[in-house]
Amino acid sequence: MNDYALLDFGGGRRLERFGPWLVDRPCPAAEPFAPAEPAIWRQAHARFNRASDESTGPGDSGRWTTVATLPERWTIGSDPFRLELKLSPFGHLGVFAEQADNWRWIAERVARADRPLTLLNLFGYTGASTLAAAAAGAAEVVHVDAAQNTIGWARRNAELSGLGDAPIRWIAEDASKFVRRELKRGKAYDAVILDPPSYGHGRRGEVWRLSKHLARLLADCAALTAERRSFMLLTAHTPEYDEARLAAMLAEALGETNEPGGRLSARAMSIRSSDGRELPSGSAVRWSLG
């Protein structure tokens, strides 16, 4: 990913470069490690601390401390698109660097398909996967996220990337509810991408818990793609759900609709630091035809 580097990690934190800015953030996966270059951390332009030392979930808010006048928003490149970044109240900036390899894979699957694909991107966040598919020539991408402000962020990324007129539908809706509604409408998709959180809430207060709701959602996604499935991508950052467990869940959901030529693969995601170490960053499961 252009304009990004993981400079160091350890002691439950990570130091990253986003464009010209160095950012120091909490990272539970970095707890078992020791920082390789303690001195470089003093160069951070912004540091995020959670509101409570006991708060470790992805929805926990906190406070940013800055030692430089950072812009309210800035952009970085991730060919072939650009992404707007900002310091959010929850310690996020608008991009998950560990997904970069998945963006390339999505683009390859779309570009190599024997027909223009219609994709569904659930829990779409700020839209990098959506933009990867659109830039590769997807017939349509349906981008779903429960937060209206995040939908707006994703649309700005599309504009920044020259994809403002691309065939993308932006849907602010609970993912599970939207998928069930599409099934009732008789809709079909060629591919589904989903990156569900451990827990969250829909627009109307719907509660999402991965441990309780993922199996049903995967089954519904399998039904949505049963007629013409080209690929599926499932990623997650819930520690109890590693790549083996997620792969088993997706395989079970596909069941009899798993075509003979389908290939399922699973791997641990990570980000490589400047000194070559790997920071564990969730799990990914891919299904593709051919």
Image (spheres, helix red, strand yellow):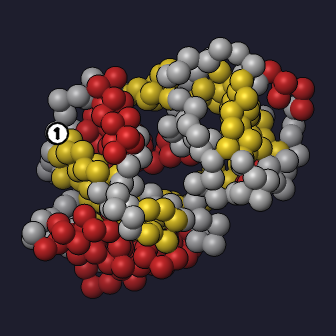
* Numbered disc total: 1
Report whether 251 appears left or right of 65.
left
Q: Nearer the viewer, residue 207 or 264?
A: 207
Decide if residue 233 is in sight here.
no
Secondary structure type for disc 1: loop
**Snapshot quadrant of residue 22:** top right
Type of residue at label 1? Pro
Residue occupying the point 58% across, 21% down: 19
| Horizontal and vertical percent position of residue 87 | 58, 32
Looking at the image, which residue is at 13% across and 74% down? 184
Where's residue 180, x and y in %?
A: 23, 72
Q: Is residue 60 above or below residue 85?
A: below
Q: Residue 205, relative to residue 20: is it above or below?
A: below
Report the residue at 65% width, 21% height from top: 21
> What x and y, as percent, mark residue 164?
23, 28
Q: Is residue 138 left or right of residue 35?
A: left
Which of the two residues, 221 or 138, is positioned nearer the viewer here?
A: 221
Q: What residue would you read off at disc 1?
A: 167
Residue 130 vertical placement versus 283 (above, below): above
Q: Quadrant of the C terminus?
A: bottom left
Residue 8 in view: yes
Q: Is residue 1 toward the left or the right of residue 48 in the image?
A: left
Residue sticking out furthest to the top = 69
Q: Residues within 10 Å of mark 1 (few under 14, many from 20)?
A: some
Nearer-the-camera pick, 85 or 207 = 207
Q: Position of residue 228 (x, y in %)?
A: 17, 66
Residue 253, picture quadrant? bottom left
Identify the residue at image location x=9%, y=70%. 186
